[in-house]
Amino acid sequence: MGGRTMEWAARANHLGGLPRKLVITAVGTFAKAVANLLNTTTVHNGDTLIHLIRSRPAGVPLLTVSNHMSTLDDPVMWAFKGFPICDAKLARWVLAAEDICFKNTVLSYFFRIGKCIPITRGGGIYQEHMNEALDRLTDGAWLHTFPERKVCQEDAPIRRLKWGTASLIARAPVTPIVLPIIHHGFDIIAVHTLK
């Protein structure tokens, strides 16, 4: 892959920011319905995440990492009560599998305006889009990663983590605040929601 896929669509000022606001609000509303109307969720220490998103020191990036149980983990994991999931300015950047989320122009555009960065699994830590993720950390933004590299629905300990996330921490000019998140049951949410 040469260059950064549709990086122009990922910019906050793309078409005055309206496409991003629309996508983040629509996806956030969907996620709230899935998490709170169609399912029951329990969150522990969610106030810590909300505080870090809203009140961390200026210029200090936030890096959240979690296990990966379904294709709905992001955005549903952010849809808990009190979380500003429909706020495009506070929304996370997330590394997303190129072969799933960026299959064609329409999906690429949708995910890019939704603050997703395409990653080629197995493409190494120095691929162009990992540099883009590093740019977001350099900007002091919030970035989320799934360091297992793929969905895992096994009821077992977290799998071997890929070292791309660690490389982002090591390469960031300002050491990010790192917040690990563990969740379970999202494999069931995905099955029930998509039936």
Image (cartoon, grey):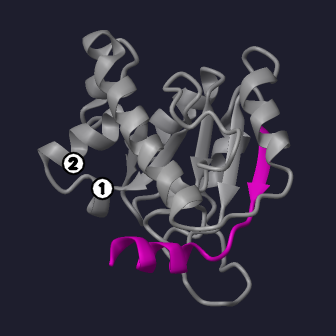
Label 2 packing within 10 angstroms: few (<14), some (14-19), many (20+): few
Locate the C terminus and report the quarter of the image it occupies: bottom left
Q: Amino acid at mark 2?
A: Leu
What stretch of residues is rendered in magenta?
A: 175-195
The amino acid beneath tag 1 is Cys
Kindly identify which numbered label has been placed on residue 107. 2
Q: Are marks 1 and 2 in contact (CB under 8 Å)?
A: yes
Residue 101 is marked as 1
Identified at 59% across, 70% down, the residue is: 148
* 62 horizontally vs 96: left or right: right
Q: Is residue 163 above or below residue 25?
A: below
Residue 25: image tag: none
Q: Name which residue lies at 53% across and 27% down.
A: 87
The reply to whether residue 75 is in sight is: no
Rendered position, 118 above or below 42: above
What residue sits 74% from the left and 24% below the top?
Answer: 54
Q: Report the Cα–Cα distance between label 1 and label 2.
A: 6 Å
